[in-house]
Image: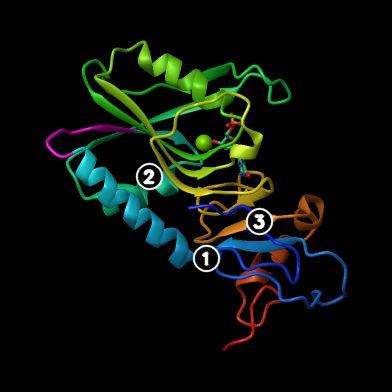
Amino acid sequence: MTLDGGVARAGGERPAGASMEFDGEPPEGGGPVAVRLLLDEASVQARVAELGVELRGDYEGVEPILVSVLRGGVVFLADLVRAAAMPCLVDFMAISRFDASEDTGVVRIEKDLELDLSGAHVLVVEDIVDTGLTLTYLLRVLAARGPASLRVCALLDRRARRIVDVPLSYVGFEVPDVFLVGYGLDLDERERGRRELLAVEDLEAVRGDPALLDLPTRPDGPGRLPPV
Ligand code: 5GP
Ligand code: MG
């Protein structure tokens, strides 16, 4: 499922999968739009349900270990295990980039897994793969522990920014190169609980006025298309 252009300019094509876009009317006060709705709750949930069915089929007869990377991936994981409704184990890891400004991909393990991966079928559940640097490093670490299989399920794939080619077995949506917030993804560690995915076009405006994040999903908000 591709969402390229999912935050299309006013008057642009309505992208498949994205539930709405601005219909040409500038928001109150004019000026550029700070936040757009990329995926509403129903679109996210429908895709997560599909991924769950796919996983249940692919992992039939085995009990995989689902590895979630804190903190962004937990919302997706929580919905995915329920959608898959299959025998599985769940474990968590926390990592941090040594230097976010450097594209080395070297990360520090802040919290390691508790389960033993040797001989296990391991599925890394990620919120979003951007450059792929973090995930590549993580996969190298996990592969060294001798799992029987090692795959990745990423809800969002921002392929345009990929630096390292990392194989993704399952992808929810391909997304455009714009900062995303909601459904586990944070804005300065906040907003992870939002059910929808928002594309933040103007980060500073939103930092100054977090209420802007509510506009695209308000029934009368500027991101709402008129009812048909
Ligand atoms: P990369 O693939 O560049 O190594 O890093 C991916 C990680 O960066 C993700 O797991 C996520 O934590 C963070 N990240 C990447 N893009 C976004 C985004 O648009 N919004 C938020 N909140 N985090 C992001
Ligand atoms: Mg992540």
Name the N-terminal-most of marks 3 and 2: 3
22 and 183: which is toward the camera: 22
Distance (Cα) linking label 2 and label 1: 18 Å
Q: Is residue 65 magenta?
A: yes
**Alpha-carbon neighbours of circle 1 within 10 Å: few (<14), some, or many (≥20)?**
some
Please tell me the numbered disc located at residue 227: none
Figure quadrant, ligand 1: top right
**Residue 177 place in picture, x, y as percent:** 68, 45
Q: Residue furthest left?
A: 61
Q: Do callouts 2 and 1 mark residues in contact (Cβ within 8 Å)?
A: no
Report whether 86 appears left or right of 28.
Answer: left
Q: Outermost residue, bottom direction? A: 228
Q: Position of residue 25 (x, y in %)?
A: 78, 78
Q: Would you say 48 lies left or right of 25 here? A: left
Neighbourhood count class around disc 2 (C-alpha, 10 Å): few under 14, some 14–19, many 20 upward: many
Q: Is residue 214 left or right of residue 81?
A: right
Q: Which residue is mark 3?
A: 5
Q: Is mark 2 within 8 Å of ligand 2?
A: no
Comes first in the chain, label 2 or label 1? 1
Question: Please, what is the three-letter code of the amino acid marked with disc 2?
Answer: Leu
Which-is-in-front pick, marks 1 and 3? 3
Q: Earlier in the sequence, mark 1 or mark 3?
A: 3
> Gap in Å between the C-alphas at discs 1 and 3?
16 Å
In the displayed structure, 150 sits above or below 89; it is above
Q: Which residue is mark 1?
A: 40
Q: Which residue is mark 2?
A: 77
Identify residue type, mark 3.
Answer: Gly
